[in-house]
Image (tube, coloured by chain):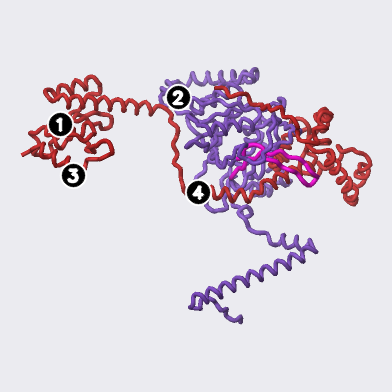
Chain colours: A red, B purple
């Protein structure tokens, strides 16, 4: 003998495994519940006459339960396939649930609407390219931060940059009268070099070296160094590519695409302007950056 | 036969055991200290002894004991050139030629062989992932200052604004590079660097960002073209990344600016720094840091620009072979003429349908602690 009221009083006051209590509201986790809330009217267990809508793989079904089948749980729910056409589906519900309380019919129709809406959205999303969500791997991140820290300390960044710059200075990559060196420092460097050349007489380039220590033919010195040095330095385009990637000098040696035009042409013009600027860091930067205002 | 040592662990009394153990430890460290002091004294008088000791006692580090992944992109370059030297008469020449050919045909060759004014900076387009937040915009601000020729454009959200599509438009408008700063949890976490006309795209993980204002005693940047220092790029993959980075900057640096931008590779981490330098003597340089510092780690390198999956597109209609042959021949002729005539009007760059990965980082590639790829 089925008594809905008794069932409801037990479920509501004592225990219902489908009930989810929250601060404001109670929800029902039963799959056959039309509204998803825990109410007297919406409880599928406490109503012998009940109807729901469920969706499986894009097809909507109307499930109907009547009191006549309450004794056989295996056949309790009648599954009716609804048409894919939204308005036809609503008509179908009207026809199947004719003479049922308005609450049931209304809630079923609402559910049909909601389900069709989310199905449409799913189909549309499939066609778009969504940003790919990649999981954050905590262990990986932790491991890599430590490795990064160790790599940073192993890198000795400032030392290596300083070494590289000194190498470029020494190999005359900046040309005869470089714009980025203080006059006194450059003079000291040249003097030191002359001193070295004077001492290193015994080796191959004896005569040439002797001649040049008297004159200030630094261009020829530069070419000598190029012959046994591993880089070629030239002005204009190619020259400065070499300077830019001395870190890749092993590759650059190889590619003979630079032409010896002598280093004088570009830098001579700038010498006059920038002699004063060599000594100090630029006093007025004019506060201007090359980047224009961001375009919206 | 040496006498067996007396181990303090034999003593059962904890207090006494601890006492003896600590005394032993202290004696050991004192002994070591005395030895070191004596050695330092000797070496203060005799620098060659120190040199000798240092040269014989080279410590083994991860960088010394590096192992290379055997694939082509990440293999040890010196070993490959050695194998080629064998059959050839002149050592090193064939290896060099192959490298040279590779360099001549790689996507960055245009930068190195171009006849344009080397002072003109290549145009760089900088944007973010959709719906970015303030820290990302601040970082993008800094980046715009790093690359002369950079422009920031806000990324719009929507269907037609995928990265690949935007890259196509940018290529059409003469940009040479595109930088997309990706954001996660209100912080920039990755950078996609796309070399524009059909170039490779590199995806880096971005960490340890320090903005200019956070660096104590930072120098002020000027709009001069900086010099570049690219350290420690060994393998082919490393060279590609290094060259890619190089093409972001104008070929001719302005030495008066005395700014140097460094990308230093250490154990697959690329450390980016920007300094202002001043030579104090022929042996000393003073460096003052300008600008942001961040670390990059290469995660993947794709061949073309990023793919756009247009799933809503209708499939192309059937075409029959006969017509295709003729039209394809005509097309190639036309395209050749076009290339000769209009280098100023670049062809439309269409993003590919699928991503073609040249290299992708996977955890299983790191077989040992000493394996690095760049």
Q: Is the residue marked by circle 3 packed among few (<14), some (14-19), or many (20+) residues within 10 Å?
A: few
Q: Is the residue marked by circle 4 packed among few (<14), some (14-19), or many (20+) residues within 10 Å?
A: few
Q: Tell me residue A216's x, y (percent).
A: 90, 38
Depth check, front residue: B341 or A224:
A224
Q: Is the residue marked by circle 2 packed among few (<14), some (14-19), or many (20+) residues within 10 Å?
A: few
Q: Which mark is residue A213?
A: none
- Mark 2 = which residue? B158
Q: Which mark is residue A142?
A: 4
Q: Earlier in the sequence, mark 4 or mark 1?
A: 1
Q: Tell me residue A103's x, y (percent).
A: 17, 26
Q: Earlier in the sequence, mark 3 or mark 1?
A: 3
Q: Which mark is residue A15?
A: 3
In space, the residues marked 1 and 2 are separated at their CA atoms by 43 Å
Q: Residue furthest left?
A: A1
If the image is split into quadrants, where does the C terminus of chain B sit? top right
User: Which quarter of the figure has residue B251?
Assistant: top right
- Mark 1 = which residue? A50
If the image is split into quadrants, where does the N terminus of chain B sit? bottom right
Marks 4/3 same chain = yes
Q: Chain of mark 4?
A: A
Vertical side of B352 occupied by A23: above or below: below
Q: Chain of mark 1?
A: A
């Amino acid at each position: 003998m089925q008594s809905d009221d008794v069932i409801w009083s037990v479920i509501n006051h004592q225990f219902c495994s489908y009930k989810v209590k929250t601060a404001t509201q109670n929800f029902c986790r039963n799959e056959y519940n039309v509204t998803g809330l825990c109410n007297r009217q919406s409880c599928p267990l406490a109503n012998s006459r009940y109807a729901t809508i469920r969706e499986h793989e894009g097809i909507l079904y109307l499930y109907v339960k009547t009191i006549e089948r309450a004794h056989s749980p295996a056949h309790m729910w009648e599954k009716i396939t609804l048409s894919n056409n939204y308005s036809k589906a609503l008509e179908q519900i009207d026809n199947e649930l004719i003479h049922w309380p308005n609450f049931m019919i209304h809630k079923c129709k609402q559910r049909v609407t909601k389900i069709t809406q989310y199905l449409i959205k799913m189909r549309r999303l499939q066609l778009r390219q969504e940003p790919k969500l990649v999981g954050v791997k905590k262990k990986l991140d932790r491991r890599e931060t430590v490795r990064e820290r160790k790599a940073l300390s192993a890198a000795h960044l400032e030392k290596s940059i300083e070494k590289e710059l000194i190498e470029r200075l020494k190999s005359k990559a900046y040309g005869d009268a470089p714009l980025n060196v203080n006059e006194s420092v450059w003079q000291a460097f040249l003097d030191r070099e002359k001193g070295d050349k004077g001492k290193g007489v015994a080796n191959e380039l004896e005569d040439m070296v002797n001649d040049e220590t008297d004159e200030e033919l630094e261009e020829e010195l530069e070419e000598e160094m190029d012959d046994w040095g591993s880089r070629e330095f030239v002005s204009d385009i190619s020259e400065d590519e070499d300077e830019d990637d001395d870190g890749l000098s092993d590759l650059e040696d190889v590619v003979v695409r630079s032409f010896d035009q002598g280093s004088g042409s570009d830098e001579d013009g700038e010498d006059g302007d920038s002699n004063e600027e060599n000594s100090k860091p630029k006093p007025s930067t004019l506060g201007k950056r090359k980047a224009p205002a961001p375009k919206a | 036969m040496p006498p067996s040592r007396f181990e303090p662990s034999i003593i059962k009394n904890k207090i006494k055991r601890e006492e003896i153990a600590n005394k032993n430890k202290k004696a050991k460290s004192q002994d070591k200290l005395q030895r070191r002091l004596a050695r330092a004294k000797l070496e203060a008088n005799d620098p060659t002894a120190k040199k000798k000791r240092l040269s014989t006692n080279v410590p083994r580090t991860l960088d010394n004991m590096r192992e290379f992944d055997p694939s082509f992109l990440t293999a040890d370059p010196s070993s490959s050139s050695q194998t080629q030297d064998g059959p050839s008469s002149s050592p090193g020449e064939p290896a060099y030629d192959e490298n040279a050919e590779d360099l001549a045909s790689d996507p960055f060759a245009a930068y190195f062989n171009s006849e344009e004014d080397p002072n003109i900076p290549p145009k760089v387009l900088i944007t973010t992932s959709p719906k970015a937040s303030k820290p990302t915009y601040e970082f993008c601000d800094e980046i715009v200052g790093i690359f002369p020729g950079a422009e920031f454009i806000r990324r719009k959200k929507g269907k037609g604004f995928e990265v690949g599509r935007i890259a196509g438009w940018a290529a059409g408008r003469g940009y040479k590079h595109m930088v997309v700063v990706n954001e996660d949890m209100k912080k920039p976490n990755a950078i996609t660097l796309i070399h524009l006309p059909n170039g490779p795209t590199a995806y880096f993980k971005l960490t340890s960002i320090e903005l200019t204002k956070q660096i104590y005693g930072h120098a002020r940047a000027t709009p001069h073209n900086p010099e570049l220092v690219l350290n420690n790029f060994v393998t082919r993959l490393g060279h590609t990344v290094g060259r890619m980075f190089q093409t972001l900057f104008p070929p001719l640096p302005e030495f008066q600016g005395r700014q140097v931008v460094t990308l230093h590779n250490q154990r697959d981490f690329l450390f980016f720094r920007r300094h202002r330098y001043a030579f104090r003597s022929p042996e000393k340089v003073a460096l003052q840091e300008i600008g942001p510092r961040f670390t990059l780690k290469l995660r993947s390198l794709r061949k073309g620009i990023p793919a756009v999956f247009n799933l809503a597109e209708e499939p192309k209609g059937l075409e029959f072979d006969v017509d295709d042959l003729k039209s394809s021949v005509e097309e190639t002729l036309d395209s050749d003429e076009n290339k000769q005539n209009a280098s100023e009007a670049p062809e439309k760059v269409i993003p590919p349908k699928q991503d073609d990965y040249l290299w992708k980082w996977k955890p299983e590639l790191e077989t040992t602690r000493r394996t690095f790829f760049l």
